[in-house]
Image (cartoon, grey):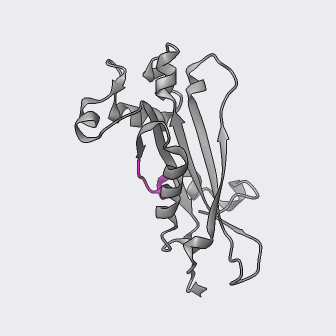
Amino acid sequence: MRKGNIHKINYTHVFIQYSIESSFIESGAGRYKQQINGVLYYDPGIEEPAPPVEIGKITAEKLLLGQAADNGYHGMSVFDTDALVLEIGEAIYDFEQNDFSEACYENFDIPFMDLLILSRLEILPAYRGNDIGKYAIKDLYNNFISGCGLMTLKCFPLQLEGSQNDPPHQRAPNEMQY
Protein backbone atom coordinates (compact mmCIF):
# COMPACT_ATOMS: atom_id res chain seq x y z
CA MET A 1 0.00 0.00 0.00
CA ARG A 2 1.12 3.54 -0.60
CA LYS A 3 -0.02 6.73 1.10
CA GLY A 4 1.49 9.84 -0.50
CA ASN A 5 5.25 9.27 -0.67
CA ILE A 6 5.11 6.84 2.26
CA HIS A 7 4.72 3.09 1.76
CA LYS A 8 2.44 1.66 4.45
CA ILE A 9 3.65 -1.88 4.95
CA ASN A 10 3.23 -4.74 7.37
CA TYR A 11 6.44 -4.97 9.43
CA THR A 12 6.03 -8.77 9.52
CA HIS A 13 7.11 -8.72 5.86
CA VAL A 14 10.46 -7.14 6.76
CA PHE A 15 13.60 -9.19 7.34
CA ILE A 16 17.27 -8.43 7.99
CA GLN A 17 20.23 -10.12 6.37
CA TYR A 18 23.23 -9.85 8.71
CA SER A 19 26.94 -10.17 8.06
CA ILE A 20 29.63 -10.08 10.74
CA GLU A 21 33.20 -8.93 10.25
CA SER A 22 35.74 -10.46 12.58
CA SER A 23 39.49 -10.99 12.34
CA PHE A 24 41.47 -14.24 12.49
CA ILE A 25 44.53 -12.31 13.61
CA GLU A 26 45.15 -12.88 17.31
CA SER A 27 47.27 -9.78 17.85
CA GLY A 28 45.87 -6.33 18.45
CA ALA A 29 42.83 -5.05 20.27
CA GLY A 30 40.87 -4.80 17.01
CA ARG A 31 40.42 -8.56 17.31
CA TYR A 32 37.90 -7.91 20.08
CA LYS A 33 35.57 -5.72 18.02
CA GLN A 34 33.05 -7.42 15.75
CA GLN A 35 31.34 -5.31 13.10
CA ILE A 36 27.71 -6.33 12.51
CA ASN A 37 26.12 -5.11 9.27
CA GLY A 38 22.50 -5.68 8.38
CA VAL A 39 20.42 -4.90 5.33
CA LEU A 40 16.67 -4.55 5.85
CA TYR A 41 14.39 -5.88 3.14
CA TYR A 42 10.67 -5.67 2.55
CA ASP A 43 9.15 -8.76 0.95
CA PRO A 44 5.56 -8.03 -0.06
CA GLY A 45 4.95 -11.78 -0.43
CA ILE A 46 1.40 -12.74 -1.35
CA GLU A 47 0.14 -9.13 -1.15
CA GLU A 48 2.20 -7.96 -4.13
CA PRO A 49 4.27 -10.72 -5.79
CA ALA A 50 7.66 -9.06 -6.35
CA PRO A 51 11.27 -9.59 -5.27
CA PRO A 52 12.32 -8.21 -1.85
CA VAL A 53 13.21 -4.51 -1.81
CA GLU A 54 16.08 -3.02 0.21
CA ILE A 55 14.57 -0.49 2.60
CA GLY A 56 17.31 0.19 5.14
CA LYS A 57 20.53 -0.68 6.93
CA ILE A 58 21.61 -1.33 10.49
CA THR A 59 25.17 -1.35 11.85
CA ALA A 60 26.45 -2.37 15.26
CA GLU A 61 29.67 -3.25 17.02
CA LYS A 62 30.06 -5.98 19.58
CA LEU A 63 33.01 -5.37 21.88
CA LEU A 64 34.37 -8.53 23.44
CA LEU A 65 35.73 -6.69 26.50
CA GLY A 66 35.75 -9.75 28.76
CA GLN A 67 37.80 -11.83 26.33
CA ALA A 68 40.12 -8.87 25.68
CA ALA A 69 40.76 -8.49 29.43
CA ASP A 70 41.37 -12.24 29.77
CA ASN A 71 44.04 -11.90 27.06
CA GLY A 72 45.73 -8.87 28.65
CA TYR A 73 44.17 -6.05 26.64
CA HIS A 74 42.96 -2.90 28.35
CA GLY A 75 39.42 -1.72 27.56
CA MET A 76 40.80 1.58 26.22
CA SER A 77 42.62 -0.25 23.42
CA VAL A 78 39.37 -1.97 22.36
CA PHE A 79 37.30 1.23 22.49
CA ASP A 80 40.03 3.16 20.64
CA THR A 81 39.45 1.22 17.41
CA ASP A 82 36.79 3.67 16.16
CA ALA A 83 35.86 7.32 16.93
CA LEU A 84 32.17 6.65 17.74
CA VAL A 85 33.05 3.59 19.82
CA LEU A 86 35.60 5.64 21.77
CA GLU A 87 33.07 8.43 22.33
CA ILE A 88 30.61 5.93 23.79
CA GLY A 89 33.38 4.37 25.85
CA GLU A 90 34.23 7.75 27.36
CA ALA A 91 30.59 8.10 28.44
CA ILE A 92 30.09 4.66 30.02
CA TYR A 93 33.50 3.17 30.79
CA ASP A 94 36.03 3.97 33.50
CA PHE A 95 39.35 3.53 31.71
CA GLU A 96 41.34 3.89 34.94
CA GLN A 97 39.43 1.02 36.57
CA ASN A 98 39.15 -0.88 33.25
CA ASP A 99 35.45 -1.49 33.93
CA PHE A 100 32.07 0.06 33.27
CA SER A 101 31.57 3.35 35.09
CA GLU A 102 30.14 3.53 38.58
CA ALA A 103 27.06 5.32 37.16
CA CYS A 104 26.40 2.35 34.87
CA TYR A 105 26.52 -0.05 37.80
CA GLU A 106 24.23 2.22 39.84
CA ASN A 107 21.61 2.19 37.10
CA PHE A 108 21.96 -1.22 35.49
CA ASP A 109 22.58 -4.83 36.42
CA ILE A 110 25.61 -5.67 34.26
CA PRO A 111 26.15 -9.44 34.35
CA PHE A 112 28.73 -9.60 31.51
CA MET A 113 31.59 -7.42 30.28
CA ASP A 114 30.85 -7.45 26.54
CA LEU A 115 29.09 -4.46 24.99
CA LEU A 116 26.71 -4.16 22.02
CA ILE A 117 26.70 -0.73 20.34
CA LEU A 118 24.05 0.24 17.82
CA SER A 119 25.99 2.71 15.68
CA ARG A 120 23.67 3.29 12.73
CA LEU A 121 20.08 2.70 11.67
CA GLU A 122 18.83 3.97 8.34
CA ILE A 123 15.36 3.53 6.87
CA LEU A 124 14.55 4.87 3.41
CA PRO A 125 12.19 7.85 3.74
CA ALA A 126 9.36 6.10 1.86
CA TYR A 127 9.30 3.31 4.48
CA ARG A 128 9.52 5.38 7.66
CA GLY A 129 6.51 5.54 9.98
CA ASN A 130 5.96 1.76 9.98
CA ASP A 131 7.80 0.98 13.27
CA ILE A 132 10.53 -0.71 11.24
CA GLY A 133 13.29 0.96 13.25
CA LYS A 134 11.82 -0.25 16.53
CA TYR A 135 11.61 -3.83 15.28
CA ALA A 136 15.08 -3.68 13.72
CA ILE A 137 16.58 -2.65 17.08
CA LYS A 138 14.68 -5.43 18.82
CA ASP A 139 15.90 -7.95 16.25
CA LEU A 140 19.52 -6.78 16.65
CA TYR A 141 19.17 -7.09 20.42
CA ASN A 142 17.64 -10.58 20.25
CA ASN A 143 20.31 -11.86 17.89
CA PHE A 144 23.47 -10.31 19.36
CA ILE A 145 22.98 -9.43 23.06
CA SER A 146 24.18 -12.85 24.23
CA GLY A 147 27.21 -12.35 26.48
CA CYS A 148 26.76 -8.57 26.59
CA GLY A 149 26.16 -6.70 29.82
CA LEU A 150 24.84 -3.59 28.05
CA MET A 151 23.52 -2.35 24.73
CA THR A 152 24.00 1.30 23.92
CA LEU A 153 23.66 3.81 21.09
CA LYS A 154 24.20 7.44 20.30
CA CYS A 155 21.32 9.10 18.48
CA PHE A 156 22.03 11.79 15.94
CA PRO A 157 20.32 12.73 12.68
CA LEU A 158 22.06 11.54 9.52
CA GLN A 159 21.24 14.87 7.89
CA LEU A 160 24.25 16.27 9.76
CA GLU A 161 26.69 14.01 7.93
CA GLY A 162 28.67 15.61 5.11
CA SER A 163 28.12 12.82 2.59
CA GLN A 164 24.34 13.23 2.87
CA ASN A 165 24.58 16.65 1.22
CA ASP A 166 27.07 15.68 -1.48
CA PRO A 167 25.83 16.36 -5.01
CA PRO A 168 24.54 13.22 -6.78
CA HIS A 169 27.52 13.14 -9.19
CA GLN A 170 29.87 12.67 -6.19
CA ARG A 171 28.02 9.62 -4.80
CA ALA A 172 28.80 6.03 -5.65
CA PRO A 173 26.65 4.80 -8.59
CA ASN A 174 24.61 2.33 -6.50
CA GLU A 175 24.45 4.42 -3.32
CA MET A 176 20.89 4.54 -2.05
CA GLN A 177 19.47 7.82 -0.76
CA TYR A 178 18.58 7.34 2.90
Q: Which residues are magenta?
A: 154-160
Location of the N terminus (image quadrant):
bottom right
Return the x and y of residue 142 as percentages of the image width and height: 51, 51
Horizontal side, residue 86 vs residue 164: left or right: left
The residue under the point 42% across, 53% down is: 156
- Residue 130's spot in the image, x, y percent? 50, 74
Q: Residue at x 49, y 17 (%)?
A: 70
Q: Nearer the viewer, residue 105 or 160?
A: 105
Locate residue 107: give its quadrant. top left
* Location of residue 73 in the rendering, given as x and y in whole percent from the top left corner: 49, 16
Residue at point 59%, 52% (across, down): 163
Is residue 83 shown in magenta? no
Classify residue 142 as left or right of residue 19.
left
Q: Quadrant of the C terminus?
A: bottom right
Residue 94 is at least partly visible in this image: no
Determine the image quadrant of residue 149: top left
Residue drawn at point x = 44 percent, y = 22 percent: 76
Left or right side of 95 for 77:
right
Quadrant housing residue 22: top right
Residue 87 x, y percent position in the rendering: 41, 35
